[in-house]
Structures are given as C-alpha cells and as structure tokens.
Image (cartoon, rainbow, N blue to C red):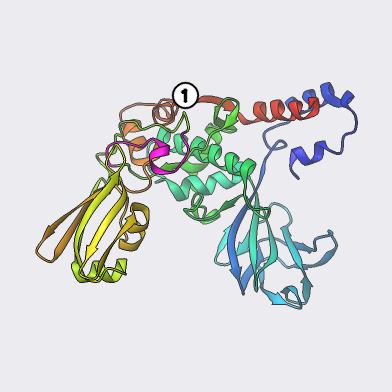
Amino acid sequence: MYIKHSLFLLAGRNWGLALVIWLFSLSPVQAAIELRVAIAKNVNQLIVGSTTTAIVTDASGKELGEIPAMNSFIAQPGGGGISLGKMQSGQLLIAPEADGYVWIGDRWYRGSLKIMREGSGFIAINYVELEDYLYSVVGSEAVPSWPKEALKAQAVASRTYALYKHSTARSVLYDLDATQMSQVYKGVGNEYVRTHEAVNATQGEIMTYEGKAILAVFHSSSGGHTENVEDVWTSPLPYLRGVIDYDQTAPVFQWTKTFSGGELGNLIGGVGRVKEMIPEATTPFGRVVTMKVVGDRGAKLVKGTHLRQLLGLRSTLFSVSQQGDNFQVSGRGFGHGLGLSQWGAYYMATQGYNYKQILTHYYQNIIFSKMEEKLVQVFTQDLIE
C-alpha cells in the first residue's frame, strides 16, 4: 500500500501532529515506496511462478487459488480476462508468501505481479519496493566491479529518477518500464553484493530542486561534454546543464561506422542513393539536431535522434565524411548526453571523488535530501491544504 493512500483513511485535521510524529517514527522499510514496473506489454503468453507458495487474487481481493512453490503456470488471455491454469479473472495479482520471488517470463523478481488485459493481450506489472528495485537497477545499469563511489552515485541517481517517475507517471497502470525507456531492471539475477552495498549505503537519499525530486537522467558517455537539456529535448531545467565530462577512458568515447550511399539510401528511405549529408542544426556541443540528406531521387531533413535510430549509432554526437561513394560516420559517446555520465562517474571515483562530489558535478544546483523527510513534508502539506 502506498503511504499517501493510507492517509486518506484518517479523518479530520486534528490528526496532523500525530501523523507527523508517526511518519518520523517509521523505519525505511515501513515507509517504503512501492513502484509499478512494466515487465511485459501486450503479450499473449507469459510463464509465471514463485519460489514460495503464491496466493492468486482478483481485483476485489478474492482468493482464486495458489501457485505451489517452485511451480509455474502459463498466463494467457481467455474469456475476456486472464487465464492462469484453472484460475481466470479480468485482473490477477500473484503474491509470493514469506518474501519469495516471483517468476515473470524468464527472470526472478522481488515483490508481486499484477496481470491485466491490454488490447488483445495483457500487461505484466511488477510491484516492488523502491530499495529492492534499486538492487537490480544498479547491477543492470553499472558495472558491479566499479569503484564503490561510482556505484553509490548510480544508486542515488536511479533512486531519484524512480521517485520522480513514480510521482509523475503518465500511465495509470505503471510508473516505469524495465528497459532503457526508463532504466534497465533485470530482476534478482542482476543483483550483486556490491550493488546491495551501494544501495544500502545511500538508503533513502535523493537529489532535489526546490523541494522536489529531480529528473535524474543519466547516460553511458557524453563524448567529452554533457548537454543543456533544452538543446536536446524541450524545456530548460536548472539542474540539467552542460558540463565537462571525464569519460575519455570509456570504450565508447570514440567510434566509427561506414556506409555506402546505397546502404544509407535503403536505411533512410525516400531519397534514393545518398549523395551528400549536410548538418542543418547542431547543439552548442556538436550533437546533430537535424541533418539534410541529399540523394539522387530527392532530399529531406532528418532529425538527429531519428538518424541515430535508423543507422544504429551510439549517439547524435557525430560528423560525416565522404570518400567516393562511402560515408564514414565518426562519433563520440553513448546516449543522450544529459545528466550523469556513467563513465565520467567511474573516472572521477578512481581519482578519489566521493559520490556527492560526482553527482553535484553532473547535476547543478541540487540539494541532497532523505526521502523519508521529503515524504513527511509533502504529506503534512497535503493535510494543511
């Protein structure tokens, strides 16, 4: 249950002082935020199971049956709802007992699983506490053998990002994806001793601006300099400003790809055999915003992000040189170039910088806060209003 939801059960403003005292007395586990992570979307079949006996209930909480420990069933659409063995309902919640793990598709996950219809198929959502979620995210996003300060920086960035998404989720069904669309989350199999240590050492710590969790985006390597957010996306943010990156040791710092004019024409489409590629707009630090592509059958403007996708490039920080019919794309970095550079964090940690120094370099004008304190402030304000 979300803490905020439980507060609405309290009637009357006289509860205010008692509520503040109660919230301050909660341990981090009791005050845990439960995230909703979409593991699979619009699928027609999914294997689910549990390490311990798992109770299966419907949307009303009615118990429909159970999944025995270390057994599995195939979930699939059926009868207007979801079929799981002999159990069937429009929505199924699978909750392992005794802190067991739930099997979803091909991995073990902490927490519980909700399955709901989506289009002609269904969506599988992992309900998991934030700190438990981070054990896997840090292990999936960073290299577990990296210096502990780099891993701690990743833990705080990932916690802040998850909390931001939790409070601003566009979907009514889930807060985050399990992929790079949000941040990579691969379940228990990507947890390591060192990722546990990094999460535990920074427990509940987030970055805030004007009292709110920031949009703590991150990337692998910027290629020497991160970007101002408005130059890559849309609106400016005072904490996502371009800074020098220390990612020169990254294996993705520099890269090249070569294409023939015909290959480019096939990949880009609509212009025939490519004859010329001319940057029309770039960011102050060199990322391609739009590129004019000229072919023997026409020309068109292509967004840098779309061109990156079409050509399988690591970033939009690239230039194009031509030799005869061949085009060489020379680029730097991997990712959008906003916020924390993971390889930059790695290098800074090897030079003795701690995680707070790393984070305040890549995120400007931020304050470090404890998540529990922020929850108290928000909930107390809700009562006053």
Q: Is 363 placed above or below 162 here?
A: above
Q: Is 373 placed above or below 265 here?
A: above
Across and down, in percent, residue 125 comes to 64, 58
Side (left or right) of 20 relative to 167? right
Across and down, in percent, residue 190 comes to 49, 53
The quadrant the C terminus occupies is top right
Q: Residue beneath label 1, please?
A: 365
Is 356 colored magenta in this rendering?
no
- Residue nearest the viewer, comparing 150 with 14: 14
Across and down, in percent, residue 359 comes to 43, 30
- Residue nearest the viewer, comparing 115 with 331: 331
Q: Secondary structure at mark 1?
A: loop
Q: Is 58 placed above or below 250 here?
A: below
Which quadrant holds residue 321?
bottom left
Which quadrant holds residue 74?
bottom right
Type of amino acid at the residue the image marks with label 1: Asn
What's drawn in magenta, residue-wise? 223-236
- Residue nearest the viewer, comparing 90 with 371: 90
Residue shown at 19% from the left, 67% from the top: 261
Residue shown at 75% from the left, 75% from the top: 80
